[in-house]
Image (cartoon, grey):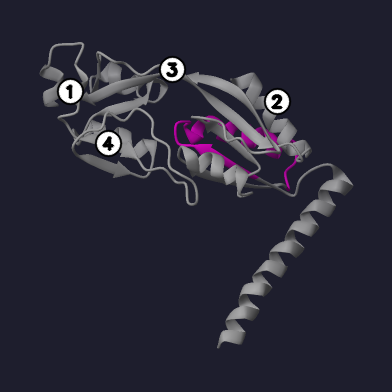
Amino acid sequence: TAAGKHLVEQGRHLLSAADELALGTRQIATGWEARLRIAVDTVIPIQTILPLVAQLYAVQPTIEVRLSTEVLAGTWEALIENRADLIIGGIGDIPGHKGIRCEPWRQLEHVFVAAANHPLCTQTQPISLATAQQYRAVIVSDTSRNTSPLSRGLLSQHSALYVPSMGAKIEAHRQGLGVGYVPRDQVVDDLVAGRLRELQLAEPRTAEPAMLGWKISNRGQALQFLLQRLRELG
């Protein structure tokens, strides 16, 4: 019934509010969050973050950690809409949103790649933009829900294959399904083994910073612990 639906919807809000109240009370009492939600942009391998989570567990074994993967505008949106307490690897323009603190973490170098047997590899380098646009692109879909999606490294190809993660994008490149930019540090082995080839474009993409972001109001010890470890790693 309509009344039942209203009760369920409002009940969810009440339960969520009660949960947040309990978490906030525990943080005030101990200084440690009961839960830490981390959104990692797909340009950062999750393997990079897991050892830091292990270090956090070593000092606070009962904390609940929730890892999620986001893409482009979806990474910033997760922080703004309170779906994440910390974002790692945010790229693009920093949202002009009050209450958010950001800092550069590491520089990301992108390389334009194709499978070794891809037709684009036979072209004389540097390859013009018009030539590259003739071939299918592999694109990681932006995960934003309520904000305008961002784009990075797109050459406006006539056709595209959209995939959910950077890992899927790299695998699609290996299988010759398209061309595009990927973070260099994620394809070093592929380039050395010859599974992928780095191609030089006439208008190459420049390096850009991957950002850390968090809410200024969050002063929890778990967040501060991870921020310090990330700064050391970066």
Q: What residue type is disc 4 on?
A: Val
- The image's mark for residue 228 is 2
- Residue 2's quadrant in the figure? bottom right
The circle drawn on residue 207 is: 3
Q: Residue furthest top?
A: 125
Residue 151 to residue 15: above or below: above
Q: CA distance from mark 1 to mark 2?
A: 45 Å
**Residue, far front:** 96
The answer to which quarter of the image holds residue 49 is top right
Residue bearing mark 4: 138
Mark 1: amino acid: Ala
- The residue stretch that appears in magenta: 37-62
Give the mark, 1 or 2, whose residue is nearer the N terminus: 1
Q: Residue at x 61, y 86 (%)?
A: 3
Secondary structure at badge 1 equals: helix
In the image: residue 102, left or right of residue 169: right
Amino acid type at image mark 3: Ala
Query: Which sits earlier in the primary sequence, circle 4 or circle 2?
Result: 4
Left/right placement of residue 1 relative to residue 144 reads right
Dot 2 amino acid type: Gln
Kindly check if marks 3 and 1 are in contact, taking CB atoms under 8 A apart as contact.
no
Label 2 or label 3, whichever comes before in sequence order = 3
Mark pair 4, 3: CA separation: 19 Å
Task: Report the Cα–Cα distance between label 2 and label 3.
Answer: 24 Å
Task: Say which element carries label 3.
Answer: loop
Q: Which mark is residue 130?
A: 1
Query: Toward which corner of the image does residue 122 lie, by quadrant?
Result: top left
